[in-house]
Amino acid sequence: MRAKLLVLASSLGMLGWGAVLPFQYAYAADTRGWGAFVAAAASSLFSVGALVAAPVAGRLSDRFDPVAVAVLSQLLGAVGVGALVLADSPTGFLAGMFVFGLGLTAAVPAKQVLVLRWVASADRRRIFAYKFTGEALGMAAGAYVAGHLVDLRDAQGLDVGFVTAAAGFAISSLVIGLAGRGAGIHPGSDISTEGAAPASPRESLRLIFASPALRWTAVVTVTLALGFYAQFESGLPAYGLTVLEIDTAAIGTAAAVNAIVIVALQVIVVRLTAHRSPPTLLMAVGAIWVLSWLVLSSAQLAPGAASAIFVTTFGIFAVGETMYSPVLSPLTASLAPRGMVGQTLGIFGALQTTFSALGPLVAGALLGAGFAQGFLGLHLAISVLAVYAAWRLRGAMRPSTGQPTPAPRPALASA
């Protein structure tokens, strides 16, 4: 029951992502008349807040009760995004977006640690899959509601998005708080409260990246993020609109198909891949990314079918997504040094956020300069690198010949 409540809370906590982020640029730049610089700075500060929050929240989740970390983080996010209703100046808007990013992202490693605590080891992939699906549905629900109610011609037209985001955070915090009452570590979990995290963040980084398996996991995390997630909201739509010359309806359809495929296949894929090793599945994700970029590249050869090919590409990407999130987080946690599960998840989340934030800049530079083939070729190469990194990860996780290596057992520091 606790795991189900956590999945529900995670879904509610993502309402704000869908209700605010797709509209904030136009709202800041045009509706409020603050210009493109302020609008872009708001997106950047949201990402900076996310980057700062993830490793700090992960460390706090190792040292203190992760329920408290998740609840307080989301309440902070609720204050930040709720304050945007009152923001009448660029400075106030930028500050609110920064706190919004802090709160939303700080809760992520805490909730991941709660899955590890509350769920038996054998069920983690399934719960992470449900959590990922719930978050996708939460984002979609937030975007759907806001899309029908937001009025970007009115200075208060995005208030409904801000209120939806704040309410989602608040209700999510309540659900997590209720679920965490009297909770301990599940008897079937391999999480231990023994061990303590080092005092120095620098020492934490040294210990984490001393592991070859974690180093290759970091490369996989970065390349798979760059290969798709960094372009989902900006680069791919920009390529479709400016190079393929498809209409905006096709962009919306592609995003909808992506979400539908994830919801339809997530549970089935988890069952079919239950006994496959994580590195093998991550190799498959990279291969699916490669296939997706090859299919997308063919759209220029068939202009009449460009819209259909674009939508199909998003559906293919979604198949890889059904393996990505359920596999990567439990794998990272299993490789984490003792007492540093939260910190490791937070640092890897920060890595993903950092490189995802670079995606729109890369896409803008290449597409703006007319290098559409370079845009496609770069992401195809990145996806191939992801396959190679996952293959090297598989080798790093194998015991050395004649020198058996025990499987890593993650631990959480007690409060």
Image (tube, helix red, strand yellow):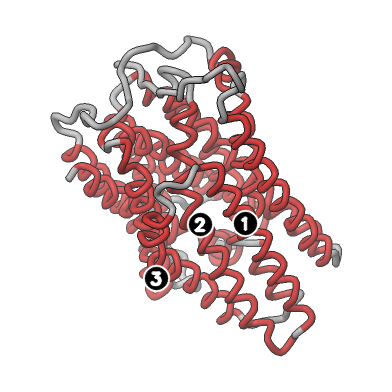
* Picture layout, residue 81 above or below residue 367: above
**Quadrant position of the C terminus in the picture:** top left
Residue at (43% x, 29% y) in the render: 57
Residue 50 as seen in the image, left or right of residue 114: right
| Residue type (three-letter) at the residue carrying disc 2 | Glu
| Residue type (three-letter) at the residue carrying disc 1 | Phe
Earlier residue among tags 3 and 1:
3
Q: Nearer the viewer, residue 227 or 24?
A: 227
Q: Nearer the viewer, mark 1 or mark 2?
A: 2
Looking at the rendered structure, the secondary structure element under dot 2 is: helix
Q: Nearer the viewer, residue 308 or 181?
A: 308
Circle 1/circle 2 CB separation < 8 Å:
yes
Q: Nearer the viewer, residue 76 or 350?
A: 350
Give the crowd class for mark 1: few <14, some 14-19, many >=20 residues within 10 Å: many
Q: Which residue is mark 1?
A: 228
Residue at (54% x, 58% y) in the render: 320
Q: Which residue is mark 3?
A: 144
- Tell me the quarter of the picture where residue 160 sits: bottom left
* Picture layout, residue 368 above or below residue 227: below
- Residue 321 shows which numbered tag? 2
- Residue 167 shows which numbered tag? none
Work out whether residue 41 can be spotted. no
Q: Nearer the viewer, mark 2 or mark 3?
A: 2
How far apart are labels 2 and 3 at the CA level? 21 Å
Give the crowd class for mark 3: few <14, some 14-19, many >=20 residues within 10 Å: some
| Residue type (three-letter) at the residue carrying disc 3 | Tyr
- Looking at the image, which residue sits at the far left? 182
Earlier residue among tags 1 and 2:
1
